[in-house]
Image (cartoon, rainbow, N blue to C red):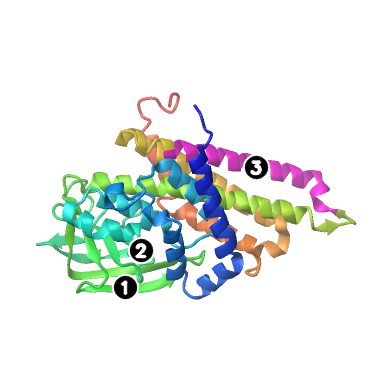
């Protein structure tokens, strides 16, 4: 299999890297974090590069690119610790809205492509524990009532894609439909807060809120699973970028810091630890590629692949984050140093879209026929 990137894909990578280096340096990121973890001007900057149009179909003003291009972009955004919800607003939302009625597509997809509208998935609930079928939010006559948690940039997004139950008990696998809810709609209340890594999230309360149907209960859960898989694949690529940059910072530090009159990079123990970190990074990269390339497969194959990737990414993120921080010593946990923010981001990502133990269970459940002997 050819893992070389095309010239267009490499040009896309270079463009995003230049943007991150020039317009999203650590100082600016710190300012955005202190201002709440989201900057509309930064989002418009991403739109100016065409990134918000990346996954939008060409018929609605987008670029119609595929999963590999998305992976390339997410890696570079990870290197810069970009906090704006690129995966949510530019990958997941277009994928779901592309299944909506034509009128809804025509209303929202061109605005997403142009960066004029930020639409995010609001699916997590207090008792869901990563289970996508655990939906307590109810839909009655096109109006929704419920509470969604940890919604990315939830208080500044223009609209939400909300799973809501039209029938059945809260943990049933059927009876889930997807709706689009505008933040300005009646009955919407948001409570913003910052996550551990400085990014912005919110609780979203819906009280008899009018909504537009994206997909009925015959498609709702399947599309929600697709959204989660896109999110995991995008996060895997982002994590590779985060770990790659954190390793580079660590190597730079080891080549600068001196003890006993010599740079500590000459110490054999630290060289071995650095080699172990590099190995975990490459394991994560290979599984990121695997998850991305499996996104177009049948749901059963796709779901198992992204869970396998998330298990490896969870292990790698924890190892790389801890080892790089320890090799820095005390400076590695200071807020003024960039490295601590890479560690925080890796810590948060390990818990998003299902933690390592959750996905280990998912992999196990999907490999009963082979007991893991044959993939």
State which quarter of the image contains the C terminus: top left
Q: Which residue is mark 2?
A: 151
**Badge 1: few (under 14), some or many (20 or more) residues near its Cα, within 10 Å?**
some
Q: 247 above or below 83?
A: above
Residue at image mark 1: 190
Is disc 3 in contact with disc 1, using a CB cutoff of under 8 Å? no
Front-most of 255 and 158? 158
Name the residue: 49% across, 42% down.
Answer: 9
Residue reaching furthest right?
261
Between the residue at mark 3 and the residue at mark 1, the CA separation in whole angstroms equals 41 Å
Is residue 89 in sight in this rendering? yes
Of the numbered discs 3 and 1, the one sitting upstream in the chain is 1
Q: Position of residue 51 (x, y in %)?
A: 42, 54
Element type at marker 3?
A: helix
* Residue 39 appears in the rendering: no
Q: Which mark identifies residue 278? A: 3
Query: How many numbered marks, from 0 up?
Result: 3
Span of residues in magenta: 263-292
């Amino acid at each position: 299999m050819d893992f070389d990137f095309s010239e267009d894909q490499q040009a896309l990578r270079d463009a995003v890297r230049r943007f991150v280096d020039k317009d999203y340096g650590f100082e600016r990121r710190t300012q955005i974090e202190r201002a709440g973890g989201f900057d509309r001007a930064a989002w418009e900057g991403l739109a100016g590069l065409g990134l918000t149009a990346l996954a939008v179909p060409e018929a609605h003003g987008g670029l119609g690119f595929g999963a590999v291009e998305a992976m390339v972009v997410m890696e570079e955004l990870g290197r810069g610790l970009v906090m704006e919800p690129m995966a949510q607003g530019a990958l997941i939302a277009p994928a779901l809205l592309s299944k909506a009625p034509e009128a809804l597509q025509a209303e929202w997809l061109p605005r997403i492509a142009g960066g004029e509208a930020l639409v995010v998935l609001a699916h997590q609930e207090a008792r869901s524990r990563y289970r996508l079928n655990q939906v307590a939010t109810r839909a009655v006559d096109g109006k929704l009532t419920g509470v969604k948690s940890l919604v990315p940039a939830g208080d500044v997004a223009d609209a939400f894609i909300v799973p809501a139950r039209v029938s059945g008990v809260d943990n049933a696998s059927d009876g889930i439909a997807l709706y689009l809810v505008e933040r300005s709609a009646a009955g919407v209340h948001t409570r913003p807060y910052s996550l551990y890594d400085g990014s912005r999230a919110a609780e979203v309360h819906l009280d008899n809120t009018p909504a537009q149907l994206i997909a009925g209960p015959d498609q709702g859960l399947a599309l929600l699973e697709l959204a989660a898989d896109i999110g995991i694949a995008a996060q895997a690529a982002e994590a590779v970028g985060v770990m790659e940059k954190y390793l580079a910072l660590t190597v730079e530090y080891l080549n600068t810091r001196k003890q006993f009159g010599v740079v500590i990079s000459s110490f054999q123990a630290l060289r071995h630890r650095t080699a172990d970190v590099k190995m975990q990074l490459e394991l994560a990269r290979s599984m990121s590629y695997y998850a991305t390339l499996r996104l177009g497969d049948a749901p059963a194959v796709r779901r198992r692949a992204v869970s396998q990737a998330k298990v490896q990414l969870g292990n790698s993120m924890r190892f790389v984050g801890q080892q790089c921080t320890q090799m820095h010593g005390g400076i590695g946990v200071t807020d003024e140093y960039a490295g601590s923010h890479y560690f925080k981001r890796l810590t948060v990502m390990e818990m998003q879209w299902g933690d390592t133990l959750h996905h280990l269970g998912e992999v196990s459940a999907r490999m009963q026929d082979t007991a893991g002997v044959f993939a």
